[in-house]
Amino acid sequence: MIKSVMVMNTQGKPRLSKFYDYQPVEKQQELIRSVFGVLCSRAENVSNFMEADSIFGPDTRLVYKHYATLYFVFVFDSSENELAMLDLIQVFVETLDKCFKNVCELDIVFSYSKVVLEAASSAIALVSKSVSSWRSR
Amino acid sequence: MEQLKTIGRELAMGSQGGFGQSKEFLDLVKSIGEARSKAEEDRIVLHEIETLKRRISEPDTPKRKMKEYIIRLVYVEMLGHDASFGYIHAVKMTHDDSLSLKRTGYLAVTLFLNEDHDLIILIVNTIQKDLKSDNYLVVCAALNAVCRLINEETIPAVLPQVVELLGHSKEAVRKKAIMALHRFYQKSPSSVQHLVSNFRKVGLLRLCDNDPGVMGATLCPLFDLITIDVNSYKDLVISFVSILKQVAERRLPKSYDYHQMPAPFIQIRLLKIMALLGSGDKLASENMYTVVGDIFRKCDSSSNIGNAILYECICCVSSIYPNPKLIESAADVIARFLKSDSHNLKYMGIDALGRLIKTSPEIAEQHQLAVIDCLEDPDDTLKRKTFELLYKMTKSTNVEVIVDRMIDYMISINDNHYKTEIASRCVELAEQFAPSNHWFIQTMNKVFEHAGDLVNIKVAHNLMRLIAEGFGEDDDNADSQLRSSAVESYLRIIGEPKLPSVFLQVICWVLGEYGTADGKFSASYITGKLCDVAEAYSNDETVKAYAVTSLMKISAFEIAAGRKVDMLPECQSLIEELSASHSTDLQQRAYELQAVIGLDARAVEIIMPSDASCEDIEIDKNLSFLDGYVQQAIEKGAQPYISENERSGMLNISNFRNQDQHEASSMHSLRFEAYELPKPSMPSRIPPVSLASTTELVPVPEPSYLRETQKVASSPSVSNADPSELRLRLDGVQKKWGRPTYSSSETSTSSSTSQKTVNGISKVDATGTVNSKAHDNSYNSRKPQVEISPEKQKLAASLFGGSSKTDKRGSKAGKASSHAVEKPQTTKAPVKSSAVEKIVVQPPPDLLDLGETTVVSSCPPSVDPFKELEGLIEPTQVTSSVNHGVVGAANKSPDLMGLYVETAGSGPSTDDANPLSGLTNSAIKNAHEGTTTQLSKGPNTKHSLEKDALVRQMGVTPTSHNPNLFKDLLG
C-alpha cells in the first residue's frame, strides 16, 4: 500500500505531502528532509527506485520521478509494483496537467488547496491502497 | 515576470469561479514565496494567524469568506504553525448544506485532525447524517472523511451504514464504501471480523459488479484477506482467472486503457492475488497457466506499464507451481530487462532473477555478465539489489568472491543502516559457507575492522567461541593451526589505528588465550602489544579490562610453564595506573594480575589452566552439598528456612515477634529479589566478641566509622540502655549502605553458582563434548578458480561456476549455538558489566568489608597462597587480591547460612522501636554464634581457590567483597 506521497522542488521545499499513517508535523518534516537528502545526491541516469528502509522503516520502497523543478515521490511497501508506481506518478502528473493546463510548480504553490482537494477527492486519499481505482476516477 | 503572469492567470481562474481566492490570500502566498528567511516567513504567518483569529470569530462572516479562511488555516498549518483555534470552525463547516462548503469542511477536518482528536466525536454525528444523504456527492465526501477520521472506537457507529452503501446505485459510492471497509479492516481487523466471512460474499458480489472500478477496488481488500488466509479463497481462482482473461482481452471500456494497455493496474493486482493463491498449489496453478502465458505474449514491452505487467507475471510464475514453458518465457523477459539500457528495467530484471532462481537456479548462468555489469554500475540502488541477488545465490563454491565483493562495497559506503545489513549478511554467509577456517577468520577480521561497531556483539562472541572450540572434530592440529593463524593475523592488525572496540575485545581475548600457545611469539612481545592496546584505547574500559585479563593469562601461562616472568616496564606502569583507576573492575583486575604473578607454578596452573575456556561448568542449583550444614544447624535449634512467599505473608501480620527482620526486608517491597541472599548483613550479627578480634587483626584506616558500627552492633547485646537511639543511627547506616550491599551479594552469588562443582570430573567430559562436532570437510569441495583472461568472465565464472552444486554445509553458527551448555565467554561481557556497575555502587557493607576494601595496597608477592590463606600469617595479607578469589567460592555456604540466620535471628537493619524484641534478637544472635563460625569453616579454601581460578580464567570475575572469608580464616 502507498504510505506517503510527496512533491518537493529541487531545492527541497515540500510542495505537497500526504502521509497515510498519522505522523506528527516534526516527523513529517524530518522525513521529507531525509528523502530530499537522498534524492538530490542521486545521479541523472540512475534508476527511479530506492529502498527506503533507513528512512521509513522496514519493507518500504520509494519511487520518484523528476519533472522540471519538482520531484514526485511515492513511498509504498512490497505489495506494490515499482514500475506500476512509476506510472502512477505519471497518471498523477497527467491529472494535474489536465487540471491546470500545463502544470508547473507555481500552480501547486498557488492552488495548494485545489491540489490537495484533487488528491483528497481522488481515491488516493481515501484508501491509500487502491492503485487500481486511480484509473477509473 | 513569469510569476506575475502566473498570478494573473491565477486571478483569472479565480474570477472564473474556481476557488475564488481573494487578493489578500494571493498576497499572502506571494509574500511567503518571496520571504528571504525562515524568520520572515514566520513573521508573515504569525501576522496571518492574528488576522484569521480576529476575522474568523466575527459573527456572521459570509460563508464564502469563511471557506477562504478555512483554506488559509490549512495553509498556515501546512507551514508548520498551530491553527487549532480554527478547528472548530472547520468542524462547523461540515454541517453546511452547500456541497462545496461541506467538502471544504471535510477536507480541512481530515487535514487538521487525527483520528484520536477530541473533536472527532462532534463529527461522527455529521458523518452519520451525511452517509444517509440523497446527494451521492455528499455521501462520497462523508466516506472520504470516514477513512481518515473514524477510529477503532467509532467504527461501530458508522459500520452498518457503510455496509448498506455497498448496494448504492452509484458506482462511485459503492467503490468508496468498499474502500472504507478496507480501511476499517486495516485499522482494527476485529471490528469487521464478523464481516470477513460476509466480505467474501460481498467481495464476490462486487467482483462481479458491472462497474470495473468497483471490481478493481474490491481486489485490494481481497488481496489483504488472501494474504492472511489463502486456503479459504481457493475457490475464487476461477473467477480471478476469468476476470484477468477478460481484462487482457480488452473487454473493459476504453477509458480504462492506459498507454494502450487494458486496465494495467487491475491486471497487476490480479496477478499478485494469483501468485498468492497458486503458491505451492498445483491444481490452482494449472488454471492460471493459459492466461499468464497469454499476457506474456500480448504484453507490449516498449511501454513502462507493459513492463510492469511483465514483471508481475514473472513474480507470479516464480511463485506458483512451476511450469517449464512459463519459466522459459519469464527467462526471456528477464533477459530483455537485463539487456535494457534503462536502470529501472535492469533493477526489475535483477529482482525478477532473484525470484526465479529459487525455482530454476540454472537461469542465473545465462545472465552472469549482465549481473556483473549491474554490480559495477554506479547506481547505488541497482548495486544493492544485485548484492541481494548474490546473497540469495551464494553457495560454498562462490562464497569467497561474493563475500569479498560485499566487504569491498561495505567499506565504500557510509550509510550505517545499510552497512550494518551488509555486515550481518557477510557474517551469515561466512558462517554458513566458509571454505576454510583461515578464510573465515580473515573475513571476520575484515568485517570487524570496518564495521565492528555495527555488528552485534554476539558475532564477536561467536568468533571467540569458534576459535576456542576449533572447527574440527578430532583434529587438534587443525585447531591449533587455526589459532596460531588467528593470533598472527591479530598481531598484524593490532597496530592499526582506530579499531572498533568489539574487535579489540576479540583480539585481546585471543591473544591472551592463545598468544603464546604455539611458542612462535614470546610472552613479552605479546604483553607489549597488549599494553599498547590498553594505552591506545585508554578511554575504553571494556577493552582495557580484556587487555589486563589477557596479560594475566599470559603471565600465568608463563609461570605455569616454569619460565620466569619479567614485567615489562610499560606493563608495570599500566598495572600501576589501573590499580588507581576509577573503575573498580579495572582496579580489581590489576590487583589480581599482581597477585597471580606472585604465586608459584603449581598454584598458577590450577588457577589458570591453559586452553580451558571451553570447559563446561556444572551448576548444582539445589545446593545439595549444603544439606549437611542445614541439618546441623537445625539440630542446633535453628529454625528451618521459610520460603520467601511464606515469609512475606507473615510480615503483614505483625512485627511483634522474632521475625522483625522480615519486616525490615519487606518494608521496601521493591528490594525483594535482592534480599534473597542476605549474606552481607550477616557479619553484623557476629557477636561482639568476634568483632573485637577482627578489629585487632585488620588494620582499620577509618576507625571512626568502624567504631561507630561496632558500637551499634554490639549495643543490643551489651546493654539496652539507650537502644532506640543507637538503633536509629544504625538504621541510617544500614539504609544508606544496605541496598548496594545486597546487590553486591547478588553478583557474588551469580558468579558462585557458576563456580560450583567445577572440578576435575566435569573437565573431562567437557572436553569430550567440545570435540564432538560435525567436521567441516569443505576444504576439498572448493572449486579451483577458472583462469580466463577477461576479468569479468573470471568473476562471472567464480560467481556462477558451480551453481548446480549445492552442498550447503551445516551452519557453523548453528553448530556453535547448539551446545546445550552455555559457554562462559558468551556471558562474559554482561557479567562483567554488571559487576562493574555493582562495584561502583558498592560501599563497605560492614566493618569487615571496610577493612578489606581500604587496605588494598599491600600484596606481598612471594608468600605461598595456601599458607597465607589457611594460616593467616599476617593480617595485612588478608586483603591481598588473591583472597578475593576465595571469596567467590567460599561464599556459597555462608550465603545459605546468612539466609538462614536472617530467617531465624534479627538483622541490624531491624527497624523496631521495641526494646524487648531487640533483646530477643541479641539473644538469638548469641545462640547462633556457634553455628556461624562452624559453618563458615566448611568450604575447603584450596578447593575454592581452584574453582575460582577456573571461573576467573573463563572471564567471570567474582567481585564481591565477602566478609565471610575472614570469618572463615579466623575460625
Image: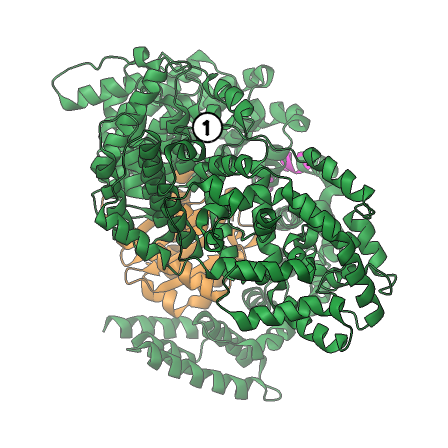
Please give the chain letter of the residue carrying mark 1.
B
* Residue at image location 45% in from the left, 60% down from the top: B855
Residue B793 versus residue B851 in the image, above or below: above
Residue B20 versus residue B760 in the image, above or below: below
* Residue at image location 20% in from the left, 36% down from the top: B492
> For the residue carrying disc 1, how many other residues have a C-alpha within 10 Å: few (<14), some (14-19), or many (20+)?
many
Q: Which quadrant would the N terminus of chain B be assigned to in this image? A: bottom left
- Tell me, yes or no, whether the highlighted magenta stretch contains residue B214: yes
Is the stretch drawn in magenta largely helix, strand or loop? helix
Where is residue B251 shown, x and y percent of the image?
Answer: 52, 30
Q: Secondary structure at mark 1?
A: loop
Query: What color does chain B have in the rendering?
Result: green
* Residue at image location 76% in from the left, 58% down from the top: B925
Where is residue B779 shown, x and y percent of the image?
Answer: 31, 14
Q: Nearer the viewer, residue B563 or B474?
A: B563
Q: Nearer the viewer, residue B499 or B801?
A: B499
User: Is residue B681 among what the camera can see?
Assistant: yes
Query: What color does chain A have in the rendering?
Result: orange
User: Is B158 left or right of B421, judged from the image as shown?
Assistant: right
Residue linked to disc 1? B614
Q: Amino acid at mark 1?
A: Cys
Furthest residue in direction left, as rendered = B789
User: Is B138 left or right of B36, judged from the image as shown?
Assistant: right
- Magenta-tinted stretch: B204-215
